[in-house]
Image: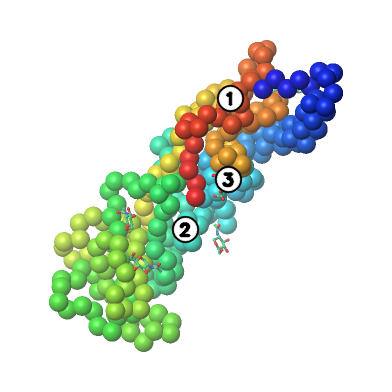
Amino acid sequence: MNYPVFSLSPSPSVFVIVLLLFVQVPSSVSNSALFADCSNKFVCGNISADFPFWGTGRPPACGIPELELKCEDNIAKMNISQVAYRVLDINQDDGILRIAREDYLVGLCQPQFVNSTFNPKVFESVEGYTNLTFIYGCMAAPTAMPVPGLFTCKINAVNYQSGYIQAGATGPGECYGSVFVPVSITDLSPVVIMPDLEQSLKEGFEVRWKVDGEACRECNSSSGVCGVDSVTNQTTCYCPNQSSGSRTCALPGSTPNADPAIPAPGRDTFPVT
Ligand SMILES: *[C@@H]1O[C@H](CO)[C@@H](O)[C@H](O)[C@H]1NC(C)=O
Ligand SMILES: *[C@@H]1O[C@H](CO)[C@@H](O)[C@H](O)[C@H]1NC(C)=O
Ligand SMILES: *[C@@H]1O[C@H](CO)[C@@H](O)[C@H](O)[C@H]1NC(C)=O
Ligand SMILES: *[C@@H]1O[C@H](CO)[C@@H](O)[C@H](O)[C@H]1NC(C)=O
Ligand SMILES: *[C@@H]1O[C@H](CO)[C@@H](O)[C@H](O)[C@H]1NC(C)=O
Ligand SMILES: *[C@@H]1O[C@H](CO)[C@@H](O)[C@H](O)[C@H]1NC(C)=O
Ligand SMILES: *[C@@H]1O[C@H](CO)[C@@H](O)[C@H](O)[C@H]1NC(C)=O
């Protein structure tokens, strides 16, 4: 974009200068600051992460809105679709996150009655996991079908304490409430042993985040740090000495990078609702 900044022709350049004052200059300041801020890694216990995550020293512009991390007592945590998770592993190379529901770390009986669902625009499932539904507060456990896991839980304000497990993602039916969650146990045919199931819930499950890593790798290898443009929701590159967001950083000694701030549609976009 070659703005005629030093042109002497009157009104258009005044307009452009005003535009530059209000758009370029603040963005220059914030881009250097964002380069510094987004260069910070999230570190919590033995979990560390950078783009596309943000939180705890990394401002929102460093990552995708859905991927906010928090560190509490050296334990990494995040909320996904209203469910509280503990973060057990972040594999940046493969784009895989391993998480466990906080409510099931203490057993089956204090559920947060919200299903583990994932925005398909941001996450995709990883092979080897299958949904199980935990059904609570049943007047009587179903007798007609073989039921893999029967359990008893006293849920506040519910009289009925029988619960059972069903394969797949279903609802509570006649019972008080239900929760579905992916687990690594894929073979439900023999009776599920409760301790194994509780262990499996503690070990969590994996989801893959859907961000085109290519744009970020280009940025990273040009000494920039990746972030997200808050207006376009696209991957952008913050550079040490560059005024506006761009795909990559200018190499030292080369002419300033003249790539448009807004990348061509269809490239390095990740849709976010
Ligand atoms: C960028 O590169 C650095 C050093 O090679 C690496 O530690 C970091 O994880 C990379 N970040 C991303 C988002 O690829
Ligand atoms: C999850 O959401 C709850 C309720 O909104 C909030 O109190 C908590 O801090 C959030 N936790 C994380 C890790 O974002
Ligand atoms: C963190 O430590 C725990 C327990 O020591 C281990 O199971 C886990 O794999 C470690 N995670 C990472 C990302 O190193
Ligand atoms: C669990 O069920 C939800 C809702 O039906 C579905 O979108 C998701 O792909 C399922 N996950 C697995 C691991 O099968
Ligand atoms: C969980 O999903 C099931 C099946 O889609 C649904 O019937 C149930 O109401 C959901 N539970 C919550 C708390 O949203
Ligand atoms: C960017 O994401 C935010 C939050 O998810 C959303 O409100 C906004 O509409 C998105 N903007 C665009 C241009 O997609
Ligand atoms: C950025 O510019 C400053 C001042 O012009 C200079 O001291 C610094 O070395 C530059 N940093 C990089 C990474 O080019």
Mark 3 vs mark 1, foreground winner is 1
Residue count near mark 3 (Cα–Cα under 10 Å), binned few <14, some 14–19, many ≥20 = many
User: In the rendering, at what x and y percent does residue 80 appear?
Assistant: 47, 56
Work out whether mark 3 precedes mark 1 in sequence or the reverse, and give the earlier one. 3
**What amino acid type should be assigned to the residue bearing mark 2?**
Ser
Residue under label 2, please give it. Answer: 81
Indicate the quadrant where residue 182 lies.
bottom left
Mark 3 vs mark 2, foreground winner is 2
Residue count near mark 1 (Cα–Cα under 10 Å), binned few <14, some 14–19, many ≥20 = many
Residue under label 1, please give it. Answer: 248
Left or right, 12 with respect to 174, comes to: right
Q: Find numbered disc 1 in the image and state the secondary structure of the residue it sits on.
A: loop
Q: Is residue 212 above or below residue 209?
A: above
Task: Please report the residue visible at 15 percent of the width from the left and 71 percent of the height from the top.
Answer: 146
User: In the rendering, at what x and y percent does residue 66 appear?
Assistant: 51, 50
Residue count near mark 2 (Cα–Cα under 10 Å), binned few <14, some 14–19, many ≥20 = few
